Image (cartoon, rainbow, N blue to C red):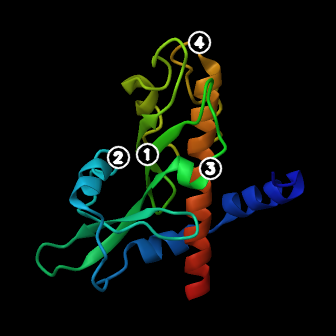
Amino acid sequence: VMPLLIRKTLFAALALAPLYFVSATGAAAATAAIEKATAEEEKLFKQVFPQADVFSKKGGTRPHHKAYKKDPTTGDTTLLGFVFMTNDIEPEEWGYAGPIEVLVGMTTAGEITAIRVMYHREPFGSFSIATPEFAAQFVGKSVRDSFGVGRDIDAVTRATISVDGASRVVKKSARRVLQQYLAEQQGQK
């Protein structure tokens, strides 16, 4: 567990990170050949990042796939964002009766394109976070949002332990992927 002072410092750095790095590199020109995800993975990833044409293989210290738009005329690719499984980044976040695994799509500006709950377990059925209404509320959320249940995330049902866990794991993993990306961009400057 990260000490409170370090967590606050990291959050402040993320909140103050100038997004001009993101917009400048998000519109990058041609990319060398991309090691692509499998066809099965790409089909799944399109569910959370439908704007992307090509997805890379998983990589990075906070494992994720990069989502690209391909220019049909030139073949050049532009990085749009990332697709990742929350349990690859935050494996210890749990809901009511076990881990919560969420597939997340996120732009380079830190905006959630969509989520899909891939796995969670509840003793009385999958009615809290597996609903389309729950997932829909994350579309367009920024990593700068609080993801607070009852504030900007509705519980949808009264199963708040799983809702809290799912909201927390999406927020934390999205922020960590974006932090890695911003640090990589800072290193390239």
User: For the residue carrying disc 1, how many other residues have a C-alpha within 10 Å: few (<14), some (14-19), or many (20+)?
Assistant: many
| Label of residue 48 in the image | 2
Secondary element type, mark 2: loop
| Label of residue 176 in the image | none
Secondary element type, mark 1: strand
Residue labelled with disc 3: 90
The residue shown at (26%, 62%) is 38
Identity, as a three-letter code, of the amino acid under mark 3? Glu
The residue shown at (60%, 42%) is 169
Location of residue 2 with respect to 116 vertically, above or below: below
Residue 184 in which image quadrant: bottom right
Side (left or right) of 160 relative to 130: right
For the residues carrying marks 3 and 4, which lies nearer the camera in this image? 3
Location of residue 92 with respect to 3 vertically, above or below: above
Give the CA distance from mark 3 to mark 4: 24 Å
Q: Which numbered disc flags the more N-terminal residue, 3 or 4?
A: 3
| Label of residue 103 in the image | 1
Side (left or right) of 20 relative to 136: right
User: For the residue carrying disc 4, how many other residues have a C-alpha within 10 Å: few (<14), some (14-19), or many (20+)?
Assistant: few
Q: Which numbered disc flags the more N-terminal residue, 4 or 1?
A: 1
Give the CA distance from mark 3 to mark 1: 12 Å
Screen quadrant of the C terminus: bottom right
Residue labelled with disc 4: 158
Q: Which numbered disc flags the more N-terminal residue, 3 or 2?
A: 2
Say whether marks 3 and 1 touch (CB < 8 Å).
no
Secondary element type, mark 4: loop
Q: Point out residue 50 in the picture as x, y percentages from the top left corner.
A: 27, 50
